[in-house]
């Protein structure tokens, strides 16, 4: 984010600062050992909040046989996480709705936010995802950046009444006016509020709908929230058959929910809307309008949509092939042609982002610098083609002994570098030693002979008690540890030691 824009956002009146009750709830949510009694005490301080928690525990969303008569009974029904998330939703809406708009259409904003929240939860429920309330909260707050922009830049939404009916066009207007859109601002604000990473991620990615299947739970939540806006638009506008078909197809492509399942999602949303309106004291969609939308959806999805879906499908296939090709070309430019690992240029970009992310979320970050021992002798003895095959085998071994979330790059020649996000020094050292042992046991077939190659690794970690000023210093430390491993006889993994003389590092 541009520093000047960030400064202006920070200075905008009453934003971004969560209200007192919300701040307390966020603080409680950070404690993995939180007790039911503390949550009950926090919620009971707000009588209106207590009433809402009791109401939702007894609502059709939870379908309990026995009515919850007290707050503690409601907490048992909902669970700690759900209670905290729902309480936070109620508290934030109550606080944020009290602002004065400069150009933003507040009534429409809150209708859309509550519809998006309901849609995100309904999509998550259809996929049997746990922690449905997180989907609701992320959907509810996905446009919160609009509130920040409206207050920080009073002119940004003025004279945009018609534009506010088209969410995608409005986002483009924001980028043109302020060089960023409200999804980026919202994610930034929620990080400042210390909301969970998965909530911030879903908000930040709410304008990016991925139409490729991905079973990763975090990706599913991001997709449900991103799609919730299009689903909400069906209830806010007067959609035609093509709009129903396009949204249904996007849901099918992104979440693997077919038209029948999507029809059920729309029915669920329609059924939940009255309860959501009552709990949040808001008017979203009249029952007559909701029933009419459902009737249209059934006709389109079950009878008339087949040809439309085929037409859209054909168009989307062409667009996706072009997009996929562009992504392939971009990925090729990031990869080392010989080993298939990432190249040095992409490593520099990734490393900077990984370090900033580690600092932002107070997560550890480890870097392993690896170098094949005496590799020049291998090339001189067996030839460069044999050396290339050994480099390829080494790259494969590195992938086999690290996690999918780890980043592997060829740094140059026979050097590789591995970035280990959210990995402390002890775990990183264990991974490095595993790699050393695995390569030591590996035999490389070189013509009619077999060769063995060993590897030396230096490892450094940015964490509490052992932090670095920047990504460059962290990499320098790993290189210094690698040099130490070489000096101690090679074929070993050595962690960085701040007591070692810095002159050992080739970077200095």
Image (cartoon, rainbow, N blue to C red):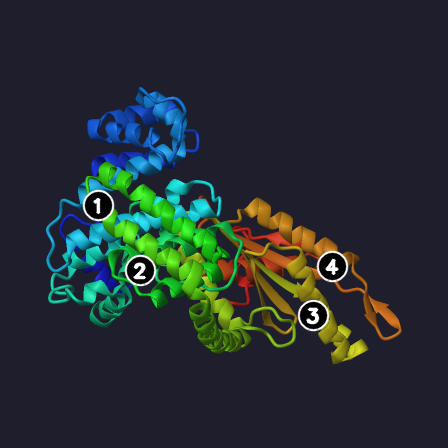
- SS class of the residue under badge 2? helix
Find residue 246 and report its image quarter: bottom left
Q: Position of residue 261 (x, y in %)?
A: 46, 52
The mark lying in front, picked from 2 and 1, is 2
Answer yes or no: is residue 122 visible: yes
Q: Going by the image, does 153 lie left or right of 139?
A: left
Q: Position of residue 406 (x, y in %)?
A: 56, 57
**What is the residue that sits farthest to the right in this orientation?**
448
Q: Position of residue 262 (x, y in %)?
A: 43, 54
The mark lying in front, picked from 2 and 4, is 2
Answer yes or no: is residue 189 visible: no
In the rendered structure, find residue 17 and report the number of the disc placed on it. 1
**Numbered circles on residues, count:** 4
Question: Label 4: which residue?
Answer: 439
N-terminal of the pair, mark 4 or mark 1, is 1
Instruction: Evaluate if marks 4 and 1 touch, with contact meaning CB atoms under 8 Å apart.
Output: no
Q: What is the distance, in whole Å, between disc 2 and disc 3 at their CAs?
A: 39 Å
Q: Nearer the viewer, residue 466 or 387?
A: 387
Q: What is the distance, in whole Å, between disc 3 and disc 4 at their CAs?
A: 12 Å
């Amino acid at each position: 984010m541009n520093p000047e824009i960030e400064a202006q956002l920070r200075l905008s009146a009453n934003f971004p600062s969560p209200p007192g009750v919300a701040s307390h709830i966020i603080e409680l949510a950070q404690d993995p050992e939180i007790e039911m009694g503390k949550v009950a005490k926090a919620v009971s301080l707000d009588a209106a909040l207590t009433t809402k928690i009791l109401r939702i525990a007894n609502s059709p969303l939870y379908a309990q046989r026995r009515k919850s008569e007290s707050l503690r009974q409601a907490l048992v029904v909902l669970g700690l996480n759900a209670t905290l998330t729902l309480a936070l939703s109620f508290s934030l809406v109550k606080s944020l709705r009290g602002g004065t708009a400069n150009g933003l259409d507040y009534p429409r904003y809150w209708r859309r936010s509550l519809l998006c929240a309901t849609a995100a939860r309904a999509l998550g429920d259809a996929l049997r995802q746990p922690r449905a309330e997180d989907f609701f909260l992320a959907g509810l707050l996905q446009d919160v950046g609009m509130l920040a922009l409206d207050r920080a830049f009073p002119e940004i939404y003025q004279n945009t009444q018609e534009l506010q009916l088209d969410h995608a066009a409005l986002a483009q207007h924001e980028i043109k006016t302020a060089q960023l859109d409200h999804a980026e601002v919202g994610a930034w604000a929620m990080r400042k509020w210390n909301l969970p990473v998965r909530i911030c991620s879903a908000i930040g990615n709410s304008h990016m709908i991925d139409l490729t299947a991905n079973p990763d739970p975090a990706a599913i939540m991001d997709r449900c929230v991103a799609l919730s806006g299009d689903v909400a638009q069906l209830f806010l506008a007067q959609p035609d058959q093509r709009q129903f078909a396009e949204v249904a197809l996007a849901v099918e492509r992104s979440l693997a929910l077919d038209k029948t399942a999507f029809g059920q999602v729309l029915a669920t949303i329609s059924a939940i809307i009255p309860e959501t309106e009552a709990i949040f004291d808001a008017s979203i969609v009249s029952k007559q309008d909701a029933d009419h939308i459902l009737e249209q959806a059934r006709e389109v999805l079950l009878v008339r949509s087949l040809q439309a879906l085929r037409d859209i499908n054909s168009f989307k296939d062409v667009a996706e092939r072009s997009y996929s090709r562009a992504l392939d070309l971009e990925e090729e430019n990031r990869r080392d042609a010989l080993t298939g690992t990432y190249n040095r240029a992409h490593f520099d970009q990734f490393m900077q982002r990984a370090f900033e992310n580690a600092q932002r979320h107070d997560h550890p970050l480890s870097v392993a610098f690896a170098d094949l021992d005496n590799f020049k002798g291998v090339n001189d003895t067996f030839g460069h083609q044999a050396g290339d095959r050994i480099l390829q085998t080494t790259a494969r071994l590195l992938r086999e002994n690290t996690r999918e979330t780890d980043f592997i790059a060829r740094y140059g020649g026979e050097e590789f570098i591995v970035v280990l996000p959210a990995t402390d020094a002890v775990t990183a050292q264990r991974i490095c030693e595993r790699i050393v042992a695995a390569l030591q046991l590996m035999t490389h077939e070189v013509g009619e002979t077999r060769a063995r190659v060993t590897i030396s690794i230096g490892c450094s970690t940015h964490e509490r008690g052992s932090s670095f000023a920047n990504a460059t210093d962290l990499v320098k430390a790993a290189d210094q540890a690698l040099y130490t491993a070489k000096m101690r006889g090679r074929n070993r993994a050595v962690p960085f030691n701040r007591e070692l003389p810095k002159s050992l590092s080739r970077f200095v």
